[in-house]
Image: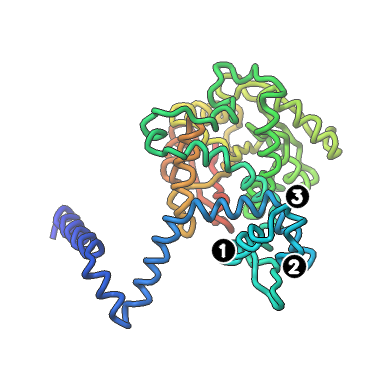
Amino acid sequence: MTQAERLSLREKLRRWRDGLFASPRFREFTLANPLTRAYARRRARAMLDLCAGFVYSQVLLACVRLKLFEALREGPRTAEELAPRLALSLEATRRLLGAAASLSLAQRREAGRYGLGDLGAALLGSPEALALIDHQPMLYADLSDPVALLRGESQAALADYWPYSAAARPQGLSAEAVAPYSALMAASQPLWGGEALAVYDIARHRRLLDVGGGEGVFLALAAARAPELQLMLFDLPAVAARAKARLGAAGLSARAQIFGGNFLEDALPEGADVVSLVRIVHDHDDASALRLLKNVRRALPAGGTLLIVEALSGQKGAEPIDAYYAFYTLAMGRGEPRRFDDIAALLEAAGFSKAKLLHARLPTATSVIVATA
């Protein structure tokens, strides 16, 4: 059998499967048959999650903004005890607690009390996730009419939050313009940066240049793991000023050089043997991403290392992030989620070799790619 015939047979089997799954008779059969009932219920639960996902996210947002998790960290509480603290009526508090318990954000305890659920406790230990959850309403507003967004018939507000994505001269943005997104990135960076540094030994290098490094959080994390590492940061001038202040407050001024500019147009500083791009590449279309990677290549010596840290499409166990980043970047006005092979092709075109995807501990948060100049 030729490859074309095998592909044709595979497609025929898939079309047969599609028709089977779409059949009401098949659904009734799987529910009635004890051997397939568990499978049918899992599919029904998955469809419920798709239909109710927005409501789940709003329950989570309410818990975060009302600081329910912080209240429950002090110990189990009744709805009557929590209502005044949350500034809600008793009925609204009971409604929120019931919803939170159904999502494992809270947990029903003895004597009508509620404590932290598994997910609620985990979120308390992740301030980065809490900061991102608090940021989500801007995206939700842009997705109120997803069809209009896809057709380009609506103006997404998220692009205004990330002003560099639409500014003709992003290097001219003021301190006020960059403050909101810089603060969010600084709050969320420890999660991605920590995961990257857990799987890649940054101490093997002499000098690290973090391009688009924001307020310097990733550099500070790297400095803590590698006491001899010299630090360099390149970002928009207004952002670089915030990095200088943060790294100075962290006692890292003597080890750090800060540069302001536009990494798509200006030459990057030389002297580093490793460059990091943390959550940068997926913010750009292919043409801009390739321009950035070529700029990085010019700044690195032969044999230098490039470290790309961002969520990737197609990662086993993290498939839903494809949907999230596809629509987030659409609302932002530019960028796209990519698979490893897509980024590897861009790296090769930019003059890099030996692109390798490291085994990430938490692919739902980030992946790590290493390439050689």
State the colouring used for the structure image: rainbow
Q: Is residue 37 above or below residue 130?
A: below
Task: Give the Cα separation between the discs numbered 1 and 2.
Answer: 18 Å
| Left or right: 116, with 38 as reference point | right
Q: What residue is disc 2 on?
A: 77
| Residues at discs 3 and 1 in contact (Cβ within 8 Å) | no
Question: For the residues carrying marks 3 and 1, which lies nearer the camera in this image?
Answer: 1
Question: For the residues carrying marks 1 and 2, which lies nearer the camera in this image?
Answer: 2
Question: Which residue is more in the foreground, 203 or 277?
Answer: 277
Q: Position of residue 235 (x, y in %)?
A: 66, 27
Dot 1: within a 10 Å radius of its alpha carbon, few (fewer than 14), some, or many (20 or more) residues?
A: some
Dot 2: within a 10 Å radius of its alpha carbon, few (fewer than 14), some, or many (20 or more) residues?
A: many
**Closer to the N terminus: mark 3 or mark 2?**
2
Element on which disc 3 rests: helix
Element on which disc 2 rests: strand
**Closer to the N terminus: mark 3 or mark 1?**
1
Residue type at the position of mark 2:
Arg
Residue type at the position of mark 3:
Arg
Q: What residue is disc 3 on?
A: 225
Element on which disc 1 rests: loop
Q: Position of residue 37 (x, y in %)?
A: 34, 77
Question: Which residue is more in the foreground, 299 or 243?
Answer: 243
Q: Is residue 247 above or below residue 166?
A: below
Residue type at the position of mark 1:
Leu
Question: For the residues carrying marks 3 and 2, which lies nearer the camera in this image?
Answer: 2
- Residue 36's tag is none
Let me know if residue 270 appears in the view. Answer: no
Q: What residue is disc 1 on?
A: 103
What residue appears at the point 80 percent right and 35 percent down from the top-left corner?
Answer: 247
